Amino acid sequence: MGMSNKKMPSINGQEWLHVFRSITGSTNERTMIADSMPKGGAGNSAPLVQCECAQAVASALIIANMNSLPLDWAACISVGGTNMSFYIVKQLPVLPPEAFLEKGNCGQPWVQLIVPRVLELTYTSIEMTGFASDLGFHGPPFPYNEERRHCLKCELDGIFAHMYGLDRSELEWILDAPAPISSFPGLKSNEIKEFGEYRTKRYVLSAFDLLDRGEAPELTGKI
């Protein structure tokens, strides 16, 4: 993986780019925010994430990893100001490529669990048709449904918790460490205000538990 803060119209002629937000803060709901965007100019506030081979799949896996809750915990305790600096990003515990080929308790390789979820979260506009096509999907964009998207994100968090080798108590601590540490206070406070509970905690632990029992971490219809 290589990163650049130069303005670039594309990567090797692709119709899509992957970026992360450089302006952040440890009190935000999430500290590391990475996303996909149509081909276009990208400045200092959206440094590019580049993959040198197997670009679409590799990019999907890296973006999912960078947005995962375990990695965000590492980012949260590393950022002291409002900048996600390159020296911080380069030290974050991004998993090696071979880790995604290993099988989870449900019998499927992690890559097969991750990529379809990244595709659905990313491909909600025709501007990202190139990315979907590069991943082998040629259907229409997915509908933008907040509840469904939240389930998919929490499923990915449960998957990555397993990939990082966390047990349930460690995941609970990362999700909701007691004061004065307070893992994700902004996220917890906002969800309690809106939903009357720390919804992400319940969803992520549910996905983690499904995988622990050897089931696919499908939350839709089970939460």
Image (cartoon, helix red, strand yellow):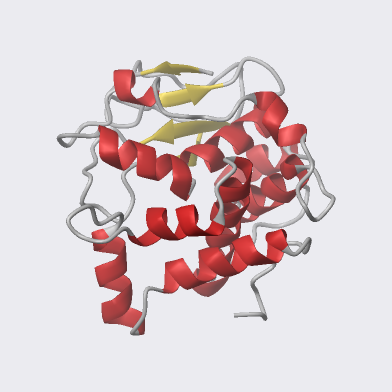
Quadrant where the N terminus sits is: top right
Q: Which residue occupies the foreground of this view, 188 or 165?
A: 165
Left or right of 210, for residue 43: left
Where residue 9 sits in the image (x, y, percent)?
46, 22
Residue at 51% across, 29% down: 94
Residue at 62% across, 48% down: 162
Q: Residue furthest bottom?
A: 196
Quadrant where the C terminus sits is: bottom right
| 93 over 161 or under it: above or below | above
Q: Which residue occupies the foreground of this view, 199 or 34?
A: 199
The number of discs equals: 0
Where residue 203 sits in the image (x, y, percent)?
52, 70
| 172 over 28 or under it: above or below | below
Judge whether residue 124 can be spotted in this image.
no
Residue at 58% across, 56% down: 158
Judge whether residue 93 can be spotted in this image.
yes
Where residue 190 sits in the image (x, y, percent)?
27, 70
Q: Which residue occupies the foreground of this view, 212 or 197?
A: 212
Res 145 → quadrant: bottom right
Res 198 → quadrant: bottom left
Residue at 40% across, 20% down: 90
Where residue 72 sits in the image (x, y, percent)?
39, 43
Q: Which residue occupies the foreground of this view, 202 or 141?
A: 202
Left or right of 63, for residue 196: left
Res 173 → quadrant: bottom left
| 20 over 86 or under it: above or below | below
